[in-house]
Image (cartoon, helix red, strand yellow):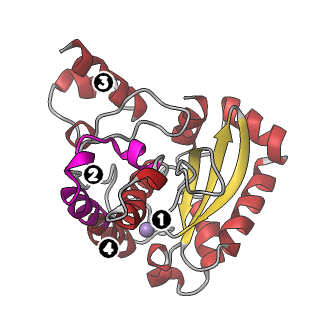
């Protein structure tokens, strides 16, 4: 029981939920869908157990308007993310030996997965991890980096605007579908990109690190509103970044 209690407490802290959520006693959206372990060198303990479930968004579909439109958010979450989750569960159902593995264990050991499910877990486990992470680092509230994170950005990139420019350029240049990430290795920050649903915690990724910020540049993330102009979507993205959460990931 103590273990469960500690896990739940760290989960609530991780999500930035206040004491009032605990006092109410009812399960939060996150408590229903995730259990969080200690942050590891490779990830944040986004470690829900199979069978995996689609987490609720921590805000309404229209909360990020006008920067990201409600229809895009709804389709992105209810259709795309949901499909990654169901495909991941389908793959795991074929390999009982994997049923007790945490998501991060699977993704940090793609090379060691059985041939029968390796690609499905890489793509759909990655999709589940990446989208769960992405929803967390978005917020309806306009914010800017502060504290240790702001200091690290200044140290590694120059001004916050310099960083945003470099990150947006990297994200714009991703050919086809993929992601751009701000990752930490130790306390050092760097900008990396990954194709498809790969991410920097994967052993198969050329660019490794612990994600602290990420942006989905698949067309499904922006096409309804921004059509083919990915750069406009990336410009709008900065209005909805949850820098408080990014700072927590950096300091974790
Ligand atoms: Mn997506």
Label whose residue precedes the other's in the sequence (3 or 4): 3
Q: Which mark is residue 55?
A: 2
> What's drawn in magenta, residue-wise?
84-107
Q: Residues within 10 Å of mark 4 (few under 14, many from 20)?
A: some
Spot occupied by residue 63 in the image (x, y as percentages of width and height):
38, 59
Spot occupied by residue 119 in the image (x, y as percentages of width and height):
40, 66
Asked which secondary structure carries label 4, the reply is helix
Query: 124 or 245: which is nearer to us?
Result: 124
Does residue 142 show up?
no
Distance from mark 1 CB to nearest ligand 1 atom below 8 Å:
no
Does residue 127 show up?
yes
Q: Nearer the viewer, mark 2 or mark 1?
A: 1
On-image quarter of the C terminus = top right
Determine which quarter of the picture holds residue 118.
Answer: bottom left
Label whose residue precedes the other's in the sequence (1 or 3): 3
- Return the residue found at the far top: 2
Q: Position of 190 compared to 242: left or right?
A: right
Q: Residue at x 33, y 71 (%)?
A: 80
Q: Nearer the viewer, mark 3 or mark 2?
A: 3
Q: Which mark is residue 135?
A: none
Mark 3 sits on what residue?
Answer: 7
Q: Which mark is residue 197?
A: 1
Asked which secondary structure carries label 1, the reply is loop
Asked which secondary structure carries label 3, the reply is helix
Determine which quarter of the picture holds residue 231.
Answer: bottom right
- Return the residue found at the far left: 26
Q: Quadrant of ligand 1?
A: bottom left
Q: Residues within 10 Å of mark 1 (few under 14, many from 20)?
A: many
Q: CA distance from mark 4 to mark 2?
A: 14 Å
Asked which secondary structure carries label 2, the reply is loop
Q: CA distance from mark 2 to mark 1?
A: 18 Å
Label whose residue precedes the other's in the sequence (3 or 2): 3
């Amino acid at each position: 029981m103590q273990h469960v209690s500690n896990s739940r407490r760290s989960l609530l802290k991780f999500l930035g939920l206040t004491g009032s959520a605990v006092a109410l006693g009812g399960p939060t959206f996150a408590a229903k869908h995730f259990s969080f372990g200690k942050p590891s060198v490779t990830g944040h303990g986004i470690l829900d157990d199979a069978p995996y479930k689609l987490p609720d968004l921590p805000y309404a579909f229209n909360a990020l308007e006008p920067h990201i439109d409600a229809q895009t958010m709804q389709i992105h979450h209810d259709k795309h993310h949901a499909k990654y989750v169901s495909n991941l569960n389908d793959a795991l159902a074929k390999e009982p030996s994997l049923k007790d593995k945490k998501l991060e264990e699977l993704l940090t050991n793609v090379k060691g997965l059985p041939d029968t499910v390796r690609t499905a877990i890489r793509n759909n486990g990655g999709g589940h991890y990446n989208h769960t992470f992405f929803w967390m680092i978005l917020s309806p509230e306009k914010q800017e980096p502060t504290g240790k994170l702001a200091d690290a950005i200044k140290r590694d990139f120059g001004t916050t605007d310099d960083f945003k420019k470099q990150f947006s350029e990297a994200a714009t240049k991703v050919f086809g579908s993929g992601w751009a990430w701000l990752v930490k290795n130790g306390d050092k920050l760097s900008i990396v990109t990954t194709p498809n649903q790969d991410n920097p915690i994967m052993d198969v990724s050329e660019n490794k690190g612990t994600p602290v910020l990420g942006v989905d540049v698949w067309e499904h993330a922006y096409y309804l509103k921004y059509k083919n102009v990915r750069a406009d979507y990336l410009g709008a993205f900065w209005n909805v970044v949850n820098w408080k959460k990014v700072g927590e990931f950096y300091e974790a």
